[in-house]
Image (tube, rainbow, N blue to C red):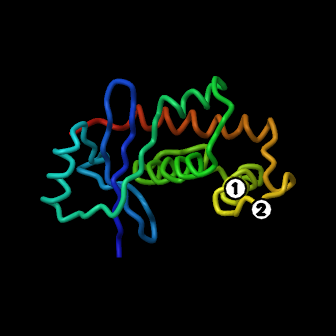
Amino acid sequence: MKEYSKVIFETEEKDYFCLWFTDINSGFVTEEDHVACFRDEDVFDAYCKAKGFTPKDTMLFDLSSLLSFAIGKDNDFDASTLLNFWNICSDLAFTLKLDFVGDDDNETLSEIYDTLFFLETADDDEVSDEDATITEDDLSDLREIVAEGCKMIIANLNAI
């Protein structure tokens, strides 16, 4: 059974409200050939009500902060935010039938993903420096994933 979440992509100019679902294949609710996306939260809520969607939770992604990380302006990162953003971008690419660097099948990206997952789920006393190492090369790859994800979102979300 599908479960729905409100996803808010926050930009300096405007916010985009979309509906994401989890299922065998997770993705975004679409209208015709594009993601159902709204600039007004009240309109989004009315759309959900009219279609019978009940979002269980809300995820917020601050694209300005993510872009600052992607271009190296900010070196701090929250593993949970980056992991969730990576997953959301992967699902957006799946929905839109686009290629996404974060979906590339290679060992390096898998290790970075696993490290983020470990950092997100482990208790602080379980995290050793060896387990939680993000190298400079890993950071570069992570920045590329975030940059491409932001680019894909900005290029493909058009409000209804």
Quarter occupied by the C terminus:
top left
Please state the horizontal and vertical placement of residue 88, each as a whole percent of the image: 48, 51
Query: Which label sits in the foreground, 2 or 1?
Result: 2
- Report the residue that reaches farthest toward the bottom: 1
Mark 2 crowdedness (10 Å alpha carbons): few <14, some 14-19, many ≥20: few
| Local SS, label 1 | helix
Dot 2: what SS? helix
Q: Residue furthest front?
A: 125
Check disc 2 and give the amino acid type: Asp
Image x and y of residue 69, in percent: 61, 31
Residue 71 at what x, y percent from top left?
Answer: 62, 25
Near-viewer residue (153 or 83) = 83
Picture layout, residue 138 above or below residue 58: above
Residue 125, numbered circle: 2
Q: Residues within 10 Å of mark 1 (few under 14, many from 20)?
A: many
- Identify residue type, mark 1: Leu
Q: CA distance from mark 2 to mark 1?
A: 11 Å
* Residue at the spot 68% in from the left edge and 53% down from the top edge: 116
Residue 9, compared with residue 73, is above or below; it is below
Please tell me in which quadrant of the rendered image residue 158 appears.
top left
Q: Residue 153 placed where, x, y %?
A: 43, 37
Residue displayed at 52% across by 39% down: 149
Question: Residue at the spot x=25%, y=36% of the render?
Answer: 39
Q: Earlier in the sequence, mark 2 or mark 1?
A: 1
- Residue furthest right in the image: 130
What residue is rendered at 32% in x and 48% in y?
18
Which corner quadrant holds the N terminus? bottom left
Q: Which residue is mark 1?
A: 119
Numbered tag placed on residue 137 in the rendering: none
